[in-house]
Image: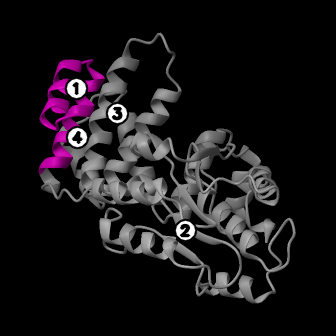
Amino acid sequence: MMMDVFFEHKATIGNLLSLDSNNQLPHAVLITSVSGVGLASSARILCATLLCERAGDAACGECNSCNRVSAGTHGDYRWLEVAEGKASIGVDQIREAGDFVTKTVGYGSKKILVISDAEKMTTGASNALLKTLEEPQGNALILLLSQRTWLLPATIRSRCQTWRLPALKAASSIDHLCATGVAVPSEISENARALERFVLSVVEGKAEARSVVMNMVETMLSADISVTDASGVLQRFELTDSVEAVVLALEERMSNQAATDASLTTLLQLHRAIAALLQRLRNGAVPAKESTCYEIASLIAKARHGDVAAINRSLEVMGT
């Protein structure tokens, strides 16, 4: 089963398994990565191995426990994520998960709760989880997966041991894309970071939204483009997907900026504004799509001209 994960991530999984074999694995672990690639697959392999009835460095894939994990029917294993049609993980989901953690282990000696995209928890959900983290029950492991850990409350981060998955090499991303029958864009064929982000968009089924929106943002930051036209691009997709793609584009742009570049300050402020909006969406806010997209496009245009004051005013309006 270890073949299901990227080569670069196997060492991290092995280290966590070693901690468990030495009874040193903490009750709360936060796994993150720069792009988000490999978080789910690494967590699934880790959990399957921890619950496997045959002790070893990898899940056997044949025992009753492995079969239950694969079928999603293992009584001591719960995978929590954003419900279909929702933008965030709600407090009721976390409360139910907390009840699951407190119950007695039914099959082996360990109970595992995985919270995927943990940064998408609402404020109420985060507070509910905090209570569970403060009072761990028995031999339970709470595994949080998050690409943007800075969106998680500091109180939650401080109660977890954090592990970061290494970035993928360009060859690994290309091999994965080829194996899934996806053509490698020639313009990023030698850019390991961009390739890894593209792999994630393919895995999540958001390749078109991320590609189109990120290209629009990059072009808009380099040349004058009609705010109306840019807004139209954003409106083509689900609002949360478009906003998330803008955040990714800004992070990509900032990663290529020199630390002394004066425009970096403007990009940082713009990133704060858009990231704050993304968090509001995940907390259940439902703003008007057309006006929100126009505002985002307008802010990007102002960032191109270094209008930090306008971006700061937007931050004040959003209360950040």
Residue 174 rendering spot, x and y as whole percentages = 71, 53
What's the magenta region? 291-320
Q: Which of marks 1 and 3 is in front?
A: 3
Magenta-colored stretch includes residue 292: yes
**Mark 3 to mark 4 CA distance (whole Å):** 11 Å
- Residue 113 is marked as 2
Q: Is residue 167 visible?
A: yes
- First in residue order: circle 3 vs circle 2: 2
Question: What secondary structure characterizes most of the magenta part?
Answer: helix
Q: Identify the image quadrant of the N terminus.
A: bottom right
Mark 3: which secondary structure?
A: helix
Q: Nearer the viewer, mark 2 or mark 1?
A: 2
| Residues at circles 2 and 1 in contact by the CB criterion of under 8 Å | no
Mark 4: which secondary structure?
A: helix
Q: Which amino acid, mark 1? A: Lys
Q: Which amino acid, mark 3? A: His
Q: Which amino acid, mark 2? A: Leu
- First in residue order: circle 1 vs circle 3: 3
318 is higher (above) or lower (below) than 122: above
| Residues at circles 4 and 1 in contact by the CB criterion of under 8 Å | no
Judge left or right: residue 263 versus residue 123. Answer: right
